[in-house]
Amino acid sequence: MPHVRTYCKAYGLVEKDQQTINKLQSKQSPNCNEPNKPESKFCAKCHMVLTYDAYSETIEEKQQKESEVKELKDKYEQDMKSMKDEMNQQFKHIMAMIQQNSQLAYIKPEALTTKKLNLANDL
């Protein structure tokens, strides 16, 4: 009577097959031999990966972080280039002002605020 046995297994009335019993046993870390909970993905002691799913998740997370780092690096390089270009434009503008009025060459850089720069443009 296979159906009766199936129902009994489903309701926990008879011992389940070996695979189910293995699911209840602790997972031992291959690295440090620490026993872990059956549902553990990583060893509680040495953090070793205990399941293929955890390994796959770890690889995916690593790839995602690498992608994020690359995006941040690209943005940083783009921002730095923009700032450099802007600074070069400002420098050229200041040099053109100095060429137009040589007195500006003797002004201390600390004294060149936006207001004073605008006044220099009026000269």
Image (cartoon, rainbow, N blue to C red):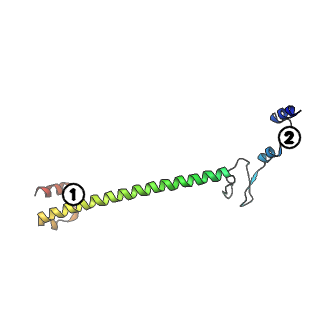
Q: Amino acid at mark 1?
A: Thr
* Displayed quadrant of residue 31: bottom right
72 w.r.t. 17: above or below: below
Q: Secondary structure at mark 1?
A: loop
| Residue tagged 1 | 113
14 w.r.t. 91: above or below: above
Q: Amino acid at mark 2?
A: Glu
Depth order, front residue of 65/101: 65
Residue 112 drawn at (x, y percent) = 20, 60
Q: Which mark is residue 15?
A: 2
Which residue is at the far left?
A: 123
Q: How many marks?
A: 2
Tell me the quadrant of the picture where the N terminus can be found. Answer: top right
Identify which residue is drawn at 18% across, 54% down: 115
Q: Secondary structure at mark 2?
A: loop
Residue 7 drawn at (x, y percent) = 83, 32
Lateral position of residue 120 relative to residue 9, left or right: left
Lateral position of residue 19 relative to residue 100, left or right: right
Foreground mark, 2 or 1? 2
- Earlier in the chain: of badge 2 and badge 1, it is 2
Residue 26 drawn at (x, y percent) = 76, 50
Dot 1 surroundings within 10 Å: few (below 14), some, or many (20 or more)? Answer: few
Lateral position of residue 68 relative to residue 95, left or right: right
